[in-house]
């Protein structure tokens, strides 16, 4: 939708822009539902407010007044069977000083962090180890499993053992490239300066507000079919839909997950298709519960679950605490599924609801029955940013013909701001090629 909007602005009202999507509504993994009488996002629910893309887009669509921030409450970590305060002064859970880890890791690990600056350290500029390789070696395995992995599981549904450092902490990698003498020094250099306001933002009324505005402004022809193949058609493209129909296009934006991309372009861009096949994805399931008003929940934004814990969920968001209570219910979101497991695909709704109830009881002692609920599954929606991902994406883009461009969460980051950025880049590429003139 962002790409379509950008193309409409560039090409003007007379251009024909067709959007192919067989879903029951537009927006992809941005989806807003009514649960317990409240509008709740059952996909992505927040964006990093310090990045400019979403705030700028909302302003451009005259929706700046719909951006909201958090209440300021902080998350917890569930580790070793109990709750801990989220360490402060960390970068994706990577500490800048040993004291921040006290209580979350054992004394030996705290001592290891304290001594890290005195240990010999070498770094090859441009290196991209997994997060676990570097952090585990310098700070110890407990920092990885109890501090870093909970954050990365929440963002990527992945693991520090498979996610590259440059994707997870680009400012840290840059500090190391500049010659930081230790990991501790690099983390301190890479930490962003304190800034006023909320780190995270959301849209009042849910992302449906943004999607609806984009639909109106983009003025697309929505065709309720999927595209199964892209063929050359003279100077343009022939799109084959899943009902056997053929559609001509002068230029195409493929805003699909990496696994689908490889199947679509195998014949017209084999190099790009091969690169797309190398990008692994994870699936996730989300359970949203509307609990009775007054259900005792802590004044925290949520809980991130450390690796190896005997919980089924990987994260819990206390929505009514994080964004402020609206209406007469307490909203809670529980996320399930990590890379390599089949929870989202194989576990039924009743079991997921039972798991959610069990985890709420274990963590908070909450046993109230919900007054409303929703289970939402997102299949292959979370790309994994392994070591060398940036080079892989550059190779993918380099193999595409000029009027065939890509947008999506597997390119430049999985957050909503990064996806807005990749769509804007895709539309600009088509404009430069002459398609949108």
Image (cartoon, rainbow, N blue to C red):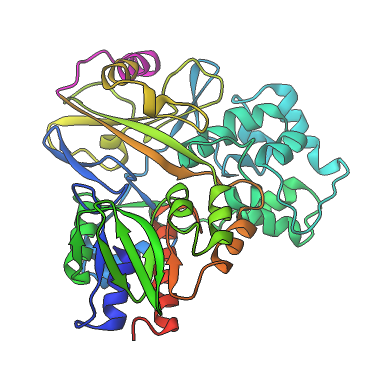
Residue found 42% across the figure and 35% down from its top: 283
Between residue 74 and residue 231, name the one nearer to us. 231
The percent position of residue 79, horizontal first and vertical second, equals: 53, 22
Q: Relative to residue 216, is residue 171 drawn left or right?
A: right
Q: Is residue 155 visible?
A: yes
Rendered view: 118 above or below 271: above
Residue found 45% across the figure and 76% down from its top: 429
Q: Which residues are magenta?
A: 356-371
Can you tell which quarter of the image residue 227 is in?
A: bottom left
The percent position of residue 425, horizontal first and vertical second, equals: 44, 71
Rendered view: 232 above or below 431: above
The percent position of residue 156, horizontal first and vertical second, equals: 49, 41
The quadrant of the rendering that contains the N terminus is: bottom left
Q: Relative to residue 127, is residue 199 drawn left or right?
A: left
Q: Is residue 368 magenta?
A: yes
Residue found 45% across the figure and 54% down from its top: 261
The percent position of residue 324, horizontal first and vertical second, equals: 25, 41
């Amino acid at each position: 939708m962002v790409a379509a909007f950008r193309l409409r602005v560039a090409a003007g009202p007379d251009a024909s822009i067709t959007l192919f999507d067989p879903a029951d509504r537009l927006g992809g993994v941005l989806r807003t539902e009514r649960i317990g009488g409240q509008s709740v996002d059952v996909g992505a629910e927040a964006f990093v407010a310090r990045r400019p893309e979403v705030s700028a887009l909302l302003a451009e669509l005259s929706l700046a007044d719909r951006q909201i921030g958090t209440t300021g409450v902080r998350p917890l970590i569930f580790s070793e069977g109990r709750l801990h305060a989220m360490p402060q002064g960390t970068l994706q859970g990577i500490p800048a000083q040993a004291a921040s880890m006290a209580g979350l890791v054992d004394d030996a690990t705290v001592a290891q962090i304290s001594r890290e600056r005195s240990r010999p350290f070498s770094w090859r500029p441009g290196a991209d180890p997994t997060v676990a390789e570097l952090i585990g070696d310098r700070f110890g395995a407990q920092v990885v499993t109890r501090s870093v992995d909970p954050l990365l599981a929440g963002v990527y549904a992945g693991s520090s053992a498979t996610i590259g450092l440059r994707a997870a902490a680009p400012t840290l990698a840059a500090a190391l490239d500049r010659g930081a003498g230790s990991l501790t020094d690099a983390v301190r250099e890479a930490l962003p300066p304190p800034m006023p306001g909320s780190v995270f933002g959301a849209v009042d009324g849910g992302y449906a507000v943004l999607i609806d505005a984009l639909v109106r402004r983009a003025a697309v022809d929505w065709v309720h079919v999927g595209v199964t193949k892209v063929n050359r058609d003279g100077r343009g493209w022939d799109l084959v839909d899943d009902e056997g129909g053929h559609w001509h296009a002068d230029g195409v934006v493929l805003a699909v997950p990496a696994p689908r991309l490889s199947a679509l372009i195998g014949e017209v861009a084999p190099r790009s298709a091969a690169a797309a096949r190398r990008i692994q994805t994870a699936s996730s399931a989300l359970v949203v519960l509307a609990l009775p008003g007054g259900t005792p929940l802590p004044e925290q934004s949520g809980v991130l679950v450390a690796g190896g814990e005997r919980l089924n969920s990987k994260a819990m968001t206390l929505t009514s605490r994080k964004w402020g209570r609206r209406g007469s219910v307490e909203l809670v979101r529980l996320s399930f599924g990590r890379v390599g497991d089949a929870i989202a695909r194989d576990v039924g709704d009743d079991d997921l609801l039972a798991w959610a109830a069990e985890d709420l009881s274990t963590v908070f002692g909450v046993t109230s029955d919900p007054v409303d609920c929703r289970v939402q599954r997102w299949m292959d929606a979370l790309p994994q940013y392994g070591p060398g991902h940036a080079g892989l994406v550059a190779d993918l883009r380099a193999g595409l013909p000029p009027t065939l461009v890509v947008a999506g969460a597997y390119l430049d980051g999985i957050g909503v701001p990064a996806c807005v950025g990749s769509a804007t880049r895709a539309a600009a590429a088509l404009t430069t090629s002459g398609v949108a003139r």
